Image (cartoon, rainbow, N blue to C red):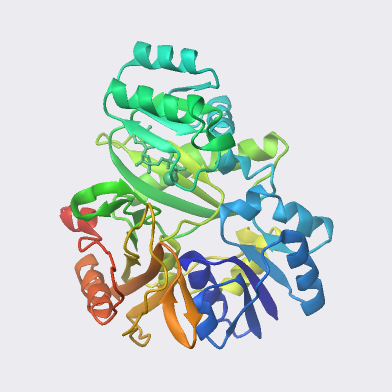
Amino acid sequence: MKILVVGAGGREHALAWKLAQSPKIQLVYVAPGNGGTHLDSRLRNVPITDPVALAEFVKQEGIALTVVGPETPLAAGIVNIFRDQDLKIFGPTREAAQLESSKDFAKSFMQRHGIPTAEYQTFSDSAAAHAYIDAKGAPIVIKADGLAAGKGVVVAMDLAEAHAAIDMMLSDNRLGDAGARVVIEEFLDGEEASFIVMVDGKNILPLATSQDHKRLQDHDQGPNTGGMGAYSPAPIVTPSMHARVMREIIVPTVHGMAADGIPFTGFLYAGLMIAADGKVKTLEFNCRMGDPETQPIMARLKTDLVDVMEHAVNGTLDQIELEWDRRTALGVVMAATGYPDAPRKGDQISGLPHETDSQIVFHAGTTHEDKKLVTAGGRVLCVVGLGDSVRMAQKEAYAALDHIHFDGMQFRSDIGWRALKRPT
Ligand SMILES: Nc1ncnc2c1ncn2[C@@H]1O[C@H](COP(=O)(O)OP(=O)(O)O)[C@@H](O)[C@H]1O
Ligand SMILES: [Mg+2]
């Protein structure tokens, strides 16, 4: 059979790479794909991004099912468009995707259904927002309501920073419509983890746990990014924490969406803040897999992902179990110079190592120009290593990364530090 993956990043390369390993697969299309999906003979890039045109392409090619990677087409209703034409697609409808595309929707949903999250209030009037901040004090967190590609959240450590964030979003309109409403919420202390499950409207299938590294530089310094590295599993999510997150957050969310008449289908990602006392709160929902979490998670998945996707689109996720590589997978992102503000494009990439059982390179911002592989975006590659411990996985990843070169490359040298710090 043929499958289509929508997107162009490292997440989509990892999903397509895994789907293509299935004996059922004839070809995996990636729309629009990147330099890495272009290089793999089992994958074929398709230069289409418009959802209506993609649905036409799927019918023309007899593609059996479609998996959507990024949030933008989901928020634009690609799932609604496909389902209207009886095409199988895994992802949330436009309505369900509001869990990610509107932070106010997500917060009021969580409040209504008793799902633990930071205390908050939503504002579109700047005077009222400023007054609320003065009343609450700092630290405090300001979030643009809409999709802002990782640039919509200000964790303000003092009042001046908080007021400046309100001015930036509500008065100067610097985030456009996405920042025309803001959620102001209580600052939460703790350690973050990513909790991702697959949902078919009713049944829930949890994926392996993972942890991301948001800041650009070592020791969690520098600006926030889309993510500079991730590993799976995340030792902070112990079996009892896993049960708690399912019970307090994931199950009530899936039931709540169904009860509200907008059943959730697709990957559901809860960003967690786990406090020192073990209490857990939801920072946000994403309605898709994380990038770069997908890369180490797919590297560990042993079950045929095509089988899993078939169950997911047929509403039978209760009939399949996932099997994971017992090793740790750890991915290090290599980014272009200037990332995250103004990444430079067009630098030639050399030294990509061959894939082995313990080293895999997933592409993100890469493309082919005159038969050369060059950088084409902020996050360029994610180099994944697998090993029997976090330390061994880290060694494998950095050993593979050592061969790769492009001018101006930036990467962190401490991916996995939280897991290494934990007493074993
Ligand atoms: N209430 C909070 N307290 C402390 N830090 C927060 C809070 N909310 C968000 N953050 C930090 O800001 C980051 C981005 O916030 P998030 O809600 O995940 O928005 P997005 O991913 O859409 O930018 C989080 O990963 C976390 O580090
Ligand atoms: Mg987030």
Task: Ligand 2: give its quadrant.
Answer: top left
- Give me the residue at 53% from left, 65% from top: 321
Quadrant assignment, res 413? bottom left
Give how far across and how far down residue 59 sits, in percent. 81, 72
- Give me the residue at 81% from left, 76% from top: 60
Give how far across and how far down residue 244 sits, in percent. 41, 41
- Residue 424 visible at all: no
Q: Is residue 325 left or right of residue 22?
A: left
Q: Is residue 97 left or right of residue 35?
A: right
Q: Is residue 171 left or right of residue 204?
A: left
Which image quarter is the N terminus in? bottom right
Q: Is residue 392 above or below residue 135?
A: below
- Give me the residue at 84% from left, 60% from top: 85
Numbered circles on residues, count: 0
Quadrant assignment, res 87? bottom right
Give how far across and how far down residue 86 sits, in percent. 82, 61
Quadrant assignment, res 137? top left
User: Nearest the camera: 158 or 277?
Assistant: 158
- Residue 399 visible at all: yes
